[in-house]
Amino acid sequence: MAVGWWKKGLAALGLLGFGGTAVEARAPANPKPALWKVADKDTTIYLFGTIHLLPKDYAWRSPAFDAATQRSQSLVVETRIDEANPGALAGTMMRLALSPNLPPVEQRVAPAKRAALATAIAKSGVPAVALNRMETWAAAFTLLGTQFRGMSLSQEDGVETVLKKSFTAAGKPIGELETNAEQLGFFDVLPEAAQRSLLEGAIERPEAVKVQFDAMLAAWARGDVDAIARTFNADMGADPALREVLLKRRNANWARWIEQRMSQPGEVMVAVGAGHLAGSDSLQTMLMKRGLKVTRVQ
């Protein structure tokens, strides 16, 4: 599993920000991240795969994407955070994350990983006693923030943040496919073995993570969906529970939402993690199984 958790987290989680080696990835001269549409006579829904975190000033927009954005009357993302009330998210996180009678967090990784875990805990500044009270998925999220803080990545530069700002400035509404609690709940119901895989991945070496991220970002920027499917989703195949809960179940939910939304006229931009739009269990595949026509725009 290892470094694959970084890819899983970006694919599945638009909610939490992650932070080391500084990312030096350069955008291509003519970026063309993949863009699709589902359309009938009076409704168009654009599907855009996002990267939740990006280096500062990373150029990814294209004329085709900007045209679709301008035509869209609303934006729908995976989930929205109430920026005016960040305590609400923290409260939701703690309600789901804390459980009594858990084993110490060091006992939830393989013995060979315990030194790396101790290093990650020391760097995080979070007392081990606090992590001991957290379910394993939540401990992984907590430590992952430290893991990526030094990579010069931020949610502020991520695709969803940029889009939300532009739609808000234009007076266009922003919706969500999942509430914060629903999104976190998918991790909360993972089997313990899958949660421990996430924790072990969250303490991987930053150098290895950088290599994975650079490859993923390059594939996304050039619109190489096959490469995204290979590098972004391959690790999920090693853990059926992760793939079922974090990818397939959520894509199925979103496909139902889009099918229902097609009954209303208008144009909508739906922006979700790029991993959801790649591979055999992609959102497009599920839409086509429902009889909807999906066309690639870019």
Image (cartoon, rainbow, N blue to C red):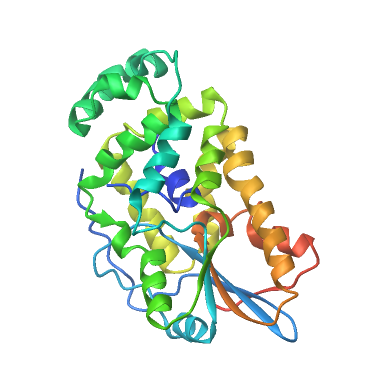
* Most foreground residue, 51 or 128: 128
Residue at image position (33%, 35%) is: 142
* Most foreground residue, 279 or 115: 115
- The answer to which quarter of the image holds residue 285 is bottom right
- The answer to which quarter of the image holds residue 90 is top left
Q: Is residue 98 left or right of residue 284?
A: left
How far from the left and from the top, in percent, is residue 245? 61, 40
How far from the left and from the top, in percent, is residue 159? 39, 66
Task: Report how many numbered discs are placed on residues in the image.
Answer: 0
- The answer to which quarter of the image holds residue 145 is top left
Confirm whether residue 85 shows in the render.
yes
> Which residue reaches farthest right?
291
Confirm whether residue 280 shows in the render.
no
How far from the left and from the top, in percent, is residue 144? 32, 38
Residue at image position (27%, 35%) is: 205
Q: Is residue 198 left or right of residue 116?
A: right
Residue 240 vertical placement versus 71 (above, below): above
Residue at image position (54%, 53%) is: 229
Residue 250 vertical placement versus 235 (above, below): below
How far from the left and from the top, in percent, is residue 123? 18, 32
Residue 144 vertical placement versus 161 (above, below): above
